[in-house]
Image (cartoon, coloured by chain):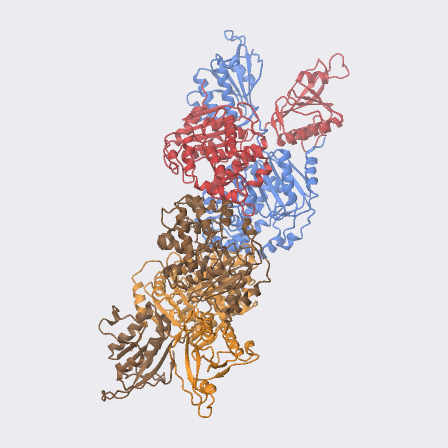
Chain colours: A brown, B orange, C blue, D red
């Protein structure tokens, strides 16, 4: 069977194709001569599956899309506090090429406008780096995310350098305001070079997915940037990525995104996918006309709007009962009913809360108002099934550990089926007096509680 | 066992308590006389569990928090297009009480600044509604979400009405610009009245959770507002909710939020929780000092940042094999291996993509580069296990339907275990020629495929 | 003979008449129904001669023209320091109906925008004045300047009151900012009433001439306002009177001016004339199209540009010699040559400087580089002829007094022919030791110096 | 006798000296090391008398003062329309170093902010001029006005060039906006060089007086720039010269002015004087502290406020009667009374209007309401005495010519005593049918009218 996903993407592409409105970026010849018929879309899942259709091998200069990744690099190389000292995070309400320095601090309003992006560029590779070192660092870093060696489009670079007056103006203003410390000419030169890096939609989709995957490369699994950096970049893309139409974009598309003047746009839904589109003709705000159309379609049809919680899952906690009968060598331990609490997926607060609620309901004395409650008030053992638990975040770990601690304190025998060791035992303050028994599978759990002769019967699954 | 969650909230509360900085809202007496020692936090899960600690019964005027809900009401009563015609969605970069009308359209920049909120107020209950009708509609609507009859704090209302010059100014400006059509005095009076509605943190947490639960009331399950409205409100809260520090708030806290000058703040993480905090002393931006602290703590510890994808789940697709042996009456159908594809949770694109990938891998001819692939190339039947599937969104439904269509077309016998009927069969264009068999449980599936005598053996679960 | 001046004005009028572009003020019906064919121009000299042509009896509401006079009244009633505390004097660069409050102080930028004008209105007639008292005071004051009892156009007043939302908005904003202390509704009501005062171009020309005549009514000679108030009003009209095209107006027309939305414009060249024009159709800035044309013509042809110094006079100092022969009873005082220094006009620094230069040249020892110098080094008397001296300002008085003091100190006999007593003698510190002789005419001077038998011969007038 | 004027200036200087507040310009070392004790003031009359006291030989860089003169040069070299296309004339309300480009046109708001001044610099000496040619042209031009060869302070130039980031930023922005066409680096370099020109207060006072003397050099009498250019420069200095405190400056000082960061300020009262002050310590707006004090003193004491019309002259028209008796050969023409109209000074509209009024009163039939009118209704001749008339502007010439034409038409014999030929006869359309008789003195007039035997008696001078 062939996957229908490329077919779906093709439909998205073809639906946008008839719109031939918009204009090629006219400020430099080489962009003005781009082939307006080219278009492509690529989608990378956060676990590394990459789909693409259309002119997905056509390379184009990434332009402002570079701002997101260079901001991440600046955070990496200079540290977030230093970066925040030099570049704000507030939407400016201005077009991309406005100066938009904050009164008082003279910081550029955010790293997505040119002034902020030029500043971010100068924070890469250390105070004393040369322009060549900065560009080299950036090129290597984005190549690593793209998964192949990217190149600078020298023709674009040369052409933009010739028409760099506005950015040069911004560079000198930043120097005058004490925001950048290197030579403004070099800062702008380096910035223009980073904008001229060539990529195709497949490269960009993987790059977007890396941001949406907490900085972990979706294919190689390498931690490309700390997850806090990815979070910071996505936060700023959310409020500032589409310049003066950011609010509109969040409302309609609902994904952190960044567009480039050569016709590319990237977007990501954290934890789900990275998307990149390409089509050179631009609307009056400088965004690819068909690119925006494709994003709108993908967002509404694929349910990618980050504020759309209508279909967020809840089936992560399940509870059932095992009847464990003692074996021949343990005759005094006759058949007993042991509640099992199963937890699936990546557990954050909501999951741990549901688990806790389930435990309280089963283990506490029966509540007259809640007919099914108190079924296992007298159970002497409790099993946690964490085999399908992908991860626990800080608060979930804390709450589940506390649940276990309280059960142990109440004299229950607690067994945790946790082959992947998602529950931290060593050094966990909840277990400093007493720890639960951690086992690898149900058989071990049964054995530990009741011996070899046990039978487990699961009945009346309860979904929390 | 007692739930540790209130204990956790109590810790959050106590950690913020020592900060006695900030000032009471001084512009009206009744707020200036609030008891600065009061503080509370409440948390409602999207499935209706409500936790709260501190002064959780203390009522305070909701003030600007009302803006979010009245915006939702305006969308409901006037329709989104009409609302967008009158109120923008872009961050203004200005303080809450700035006029901030967009050049050209004269629309208020967004519904979270006063100008936009007053406009939203006038769009409630129809063009010809009186101020009493509008306020009555609002009061009933928020009471319904809060789950109890809320009241207007008449003392606050009277006091604010006396000091309403700035808002009166805004009201007349809006009238002059043709944005509002009713009497400005009435518009402002109604707006002030909506701001004076009293609630406690428990009410507000449920209200926040309703927004974060796609408009479905977390306790009653009632669809309070269309999920598109909830999405729109949350989108605007994300980019504009915290006025001129919205970018900073998104970076640090990462939740759509709204604060009120009486010391309340609400926030929500879509699909997870609604949160409300209260403490009357304000920072210079007009946000509750301790409230912000509590939110920062909750966000970082509870992993509630919406851009934090580090722990988003992936374990939603599982595949295994059933060996089905024909019964005595079906001797010609000897033992066969049937692949089963299990799908859990609320499935959006990412889940359907993983499922598709799993199907392709199992059913397509073996790929020499992928040792485990092609195991069921020749299977004559395929089972989809949708028992644990909470929901399918549009694109997931489309992709899975197409998967099934292609399998049917390839001559496979497709059985869908779908007791809750999440897979739409009737009218689904993928099934207009041929439909899969839908059954309620594994036994039925087995029976259908192989007859009564089947044995199912699940081996080597594969996780996608 | 008939004066050609009305003919000249008629030419100006007719040259502008063919321009029928522009639109009637449309925001209220009564202005929109004005007869667009009406037009008039009036000119009042600062000494009270009034010329007018066209529809010079047609009354129209003065609208924003009232701002200039009410600002003067506010200065009068509240004092300049209080007025400056409440209203700035800087151009706002904004349109007339912009709020334009200064950051920090929240003062309206200047009294010519609506916010400043409403504030000025509230400063008239004392803190506790009612709106009726303020309007009554204003109406009486402008009637006095116009020289006849002006009336409020009740139809215009009622119509504008109905459409006063923007101004009401401004009023409440001013109240909120603590700029005005009275009820905003009353402030705006009063302001609208002052704008609805009816006048014709003849009234307005005299009003303008009063401002340009240092506050002295050109016809009655009454000091309507202190000259410092007139100066302040004209200063602000210069930089702010034409809103966001003030710079352009100063460059092209070069007169302090103020226009009203009913089609009137006033302007004045200090010390020369007051001008008023009328024609109802407005350009997109809200100024009368033909009115602007007439002003441009009058300015360029009549040389009224205040920065046009090409034809400013210099012939105010003249010096000659009288030969005075002693009479019969003074035989020992035989014929002597006495230098006479004649000073004409209103003497400011420039005149006194020229006089001083003349004295130094005549009285000091001959300068070899200056052939004509030192002619009267040995003169024992000096005559100052101040008969044609209209006035001396502070510095001129000081310098001429000092000249005389030095001549007296050098032993010269100084006689001042000063029938109008423009030279202050009593209390003048320069004369505390010794005073010059003040006489009424040449005969007295001659008599004083030489006796009855003197003959005066004026030869070789020297012009300074 | 020594002139008291230097003594007066000395008093002004000493009164300001005790104020040691303010700070030296700190942005470049060479300015920061200026001697803060230096101070000077100079004053040049428009007819070339120059007074100065204090450190009047100390040279300092003129800095922004250059903007006024380079704007004049730009107008000269590129023409006013081209200059207006590139640079606006509206106050920006911004500080001097703000970009302040007009929306839409991107023109700098005015030539007094840096952006406008850099643009003006590039308009000097033609499109293709090199930076050296532009600077050379500027240096020669200002040297000519100063009356001696001025030099560039190379140390200041080098230092400012090193710290020119903000101006470089502005330069590139202007280039990007298409406002300047030359290389931005060169434009800024040239601009900095023009700012580094050294002058002392005496040079600057003469330069200011040239602007105030309609472009005519006060000493050499050479027309340095067309009077329209001088008017344009002064207009812009009035509304924009003191940046964001221009309104305040006009109100308090009332003179077009321009200050420089090295501590110089120039100002002028058109037709009267040019003033320059110097003292290096600056207030927070960048204006010399003591310089401003001295200007305020000079303005208020010397009556130099341009809106202060309290002492403008009116005594320019005088009328008297000559009794002319016919000689022996004209016995039939016995003694007749001829009215004489004398006109003094530079006559603009106001003077011609007064003259006309006088003529109408004397010549028209007696008006019963005006007892003295109609005294010369039957006079067969009229004499105009223009000996003391310095000049007639366009409208005055037109009106007086028309007066004469009407008298001639009425059959009067008109004689004009006009030795300097201020009344244009040839080509004057009023005289195309008939001309008045122009003579050189009274004797000629008498002779022409009555013959040798005439006696003239002047009685009852009437002042208009």
Depth order, front residue of B112/C228: B112
Residue B341 x/y as whole percent? 44, 77
Residue B41 x/y as whole percent? 35, 68
Residue D12 x/y as whole percent? 42, 29
> Relative to residue B56, is residue B459 depicted above or below?
below
| Residue furthest top in the image | C331
Is C24 displayed left or right of A246 in the figure?
Answer: right
Q: Quadrant of residue C270?
A: top right
Q: Quadrant of the N terminus of chain D?
A: top left
Is residue D449 at all visible to an observer of this figure?
A: yes
Depth order, front residue of A366/B161: A366
Is A202 displayed left or right of C306 in the figure?
Answer: left
Depth order, front residue of D123/C218: D123
> Relative to residue C298, is residue A448 depicted above or below?
below
Depth order, front residue of C168/D196: D196
Q: Quadrant of the C terminus of chain D?
A: top right
* Numbered marks: total: 0
Q: Quadrant of residue C457?
A: top right
| Residue furthest front in the image | B368
Residue A363 x/y as whole percent? 30, 81
| Residue furthest right in the image | D332
Is residue D95 at all visible to an observer of this figure?
A: no
């Amino acid at each position: 069977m062939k996957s229908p996903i490329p077919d779906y993407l093709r439909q998205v592409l073809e639906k946008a194709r008839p719109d031939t409105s918009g204009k090629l970026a006219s400020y430099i010849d080489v962009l003005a001569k781009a082939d307006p018929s080219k278009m492509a879309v690529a989608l990378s899942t956060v676990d590394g599956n990459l789909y693409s259709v259309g002119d997905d091998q056509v390379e184009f200069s990434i332009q402002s899309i570079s701002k997101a990744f260079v901001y991440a690099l600046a955070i990496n190389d200079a540290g977030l506090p230093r970066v925040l000292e030099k570049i704000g995070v507030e939407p400016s309400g201005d077009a991309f090429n406005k100066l938009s320095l904050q009164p008082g601090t003279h910081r550029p309003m955010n790293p997505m406008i040119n002034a902020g992006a030029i500043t971010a560029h100068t924070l890469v590779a250390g105070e004393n780096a040369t322009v060549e070192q900065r560009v080299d660092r950036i090129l290597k870093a984005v190549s690593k995310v793209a998964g192949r060696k990217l190149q600078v489009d020298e023709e674009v670079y040369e052409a933009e350098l010739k028409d760099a007056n506005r950015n040069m103006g911004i560079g000198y203003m930043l120097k005058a305001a004490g925001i950048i410390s290197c030579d403004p000419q070099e800062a702008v030169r380096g910035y223009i070079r980073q904008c001229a890096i060539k990529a195709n939609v497949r490269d960009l989709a993987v790059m977007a997915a890396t941001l949406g995957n907490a900085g972990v490369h979706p294919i190689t699994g390498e931690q490309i940037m700390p997850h806090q950096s990815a979070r910071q970049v996505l936060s700023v893309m959310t409020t500032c990525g589409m310049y003066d139409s950011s609010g509109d974009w969040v409302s309609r598309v609902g994904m952190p995104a960044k567009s480039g003047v050569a016709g590319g746009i990237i977007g990501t839904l954290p934890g789900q996918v990275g998307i990149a589109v390409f089509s050179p003709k631009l609307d009056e705000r400088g965004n690819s006309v068909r690119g925006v159309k494709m994003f709108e379609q993908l967002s509404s049809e694929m349910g990618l709007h980050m504020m759309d919680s209508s279909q967020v899952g809840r089936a992560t906690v399940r509870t059932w009962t095992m009847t464990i009968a003692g074996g021949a060598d343990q005759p005094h331990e006759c058949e007993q009913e042991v509640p099992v609490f199963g937890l699936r997926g990546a557990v954050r607060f909501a999951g741990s809360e549901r688990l806790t609620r389930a435990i309280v309901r089963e283990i506490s004395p029966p509540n007259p108002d809640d007919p099914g409650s108190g079924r296992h008030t007298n159970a002497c053992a409790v099993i946690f099934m964490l085999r399908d638990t992908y991860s626990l975040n800080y608060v979930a770990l804390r709450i589940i550990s506390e649940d276990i601690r309280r059960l142990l304190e109440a004299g229950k025998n607690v067994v945790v089926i946790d082959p992947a060791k998602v529950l931290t035992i060593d050094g966990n303050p909840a277990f400093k007096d007493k720890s639960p028994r951690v086992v690898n599978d149900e058989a071990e759990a049964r054995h530990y509680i009741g011996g070899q002769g046990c039978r487990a019967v699961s009945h009346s699954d309860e979904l929390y």
